Image: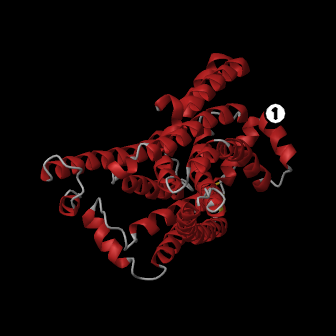
Amino acid sequence: MVLKTFGWSFAVTALGLVAAIFYGGWQAFGIVAILSVLEISLSFDNAVINAGILKKMNAFWQKIFLTIGILIAVFGMRLVFPVVIVAVSAKLGPIEAIDLSFNDPDKYKELVTDAHPSIAAFGGMFLLMIFLDFIFDEDRDIHWLRWIERPLAKLGKVDMLSVCVALIILMITAMTFATQAHQHGGGHVDKSGTVMLSGIAGLITYLVVGGLSGFFEGKLEEEEEREHEAEEEAKKKGKPVTGVALAGKAAFFLFLYLEVLDASFSFDGVIGAFAITNEIVLMALGLGIGAMYVRSLTVYLVREGTLDDYVYLEHGAHYAIGALSIILLITIQHEINELITGSVGVILIALSFWSSVKRNRALAAESGGGDGSGTKAEVSSGV
């Protein structure tokens, strides 16, 4: 099962590391290896969130996620995205930006650094909305940190509360962190307007994508019910019916939602990579290898039913997302070590896994070694 799920990741790792050696020797090999680990550590929460969505898809769309999806993730976010950042922020053409990344990496890094407030505000607000909508969800039955989650879930009855909180945080960020010291002089550049516009764009993107996702998730449920009825009718008539086409449109939009989520989660990895190297080829190799493992891990979590067995993993991942969103907003003015950024998510998810194990043991003890589906024990095992 492990080889089947992670086989392509192992193959891409081998090819990527060999390509790095041919490109820049053993130093390039080391850089690509470090970038791969960085991407995996920063994106583990991404895999957990993705698994919660991917489990709603059939095997066909899971394969699409691992094939076409990985092409979008690697070439879109890990290769094209850094070039687009420079092209837009420096008002260059795409070809000119690519030429700059190869022939003048120092200038390329400078331009990306100048664009960081916009990137951090957009990505930070998108991820913050994911966390807020989760923490204010009044319909969620299972709570990990009950002393925090239960009161906030009750507040979730207030319409548009997550949007209001996000906008307040954005205004505080723009007023507090948006004035940046200019790299080449003693003056300061006011980035508050840029941060506000980029943050609002991130919020609007989340609302649009989330709205489409919710709509098509509803359509998916309707079509699955219709498919079930059609299969029952076909059985009576002795005619087999395939359900792939029936759920195809809804699954396609969930796939698009996954790709947008991946793009947002990739912001920190792409920006963090510039702290390690300016070379776009090494960035693409290292982050691409990491992206492959994130996708394989997502499918593994789905097929093994890990999210069902360890119910607090999703909570830990969302807390990691919330922490990452705040870190992104802080980095508008203050540098934060990538090791800290990656460690926060890993620690939160590890704690949620440990809590899930404790819960399962408590349920097993209470049910006398049964399957552990008791509601009382489930609630009492929360922190």
Q: Which residue is mark 1?
A: 103
Q: How is the image coloured?
A: secondary structure
Lateral position of residue 12 relative to residue 300, left or right: right
Furthest residue to the front? 237
Q: Where, by quadrant of the figure, is residue 63 drawn?
A: top right
Question: Where's residue 359, x and y in %?
Answer: 23, 51
Question: Where's residue 290, x and y in %?
Answer: 57, 36
Residue at point 28% right, 49% down? 356
Relative to 35, residue 320 above or below: below
Q: Say which of 145 and 358 sits in front.
A: 358
Q: Amino acid at mark 1?
A: Asn
Residue at point 22% right, 63% down? 375
Element on which disc 1 rests: helix
Q: Where, by quadrant of the figure, is residue 245 drawn?
A: bottom right
Q: Is residue 264 visible?
A: yes
Q: Say which of 86 and 312 sits in front.
A: 312
Question: Where's residue 159, x and y in %?
Answer: 46, 82
Disc 1: CA contacts within 10 A as few (<14), some (14-19) or many (>=20): few
Residue at point 20% right, 56% down? 381
Question: Where's residue 133, x and y in %?
Answer: 46, 69
Residue at point 57% right, 31% down? 9
Lateral position of residue 350 relative to residue 252, left or right: left
Lateral position of residue 350 relative to residue 50, left or right: left
Relative to 121, residue 262 above or below: above
Q: Is residue 179 visible?
A: no
Q: How many marks?
A: 1
Relative to 170, residue 109 above or below: above
Q: Quadrant of the C terminus?
A: bottom left
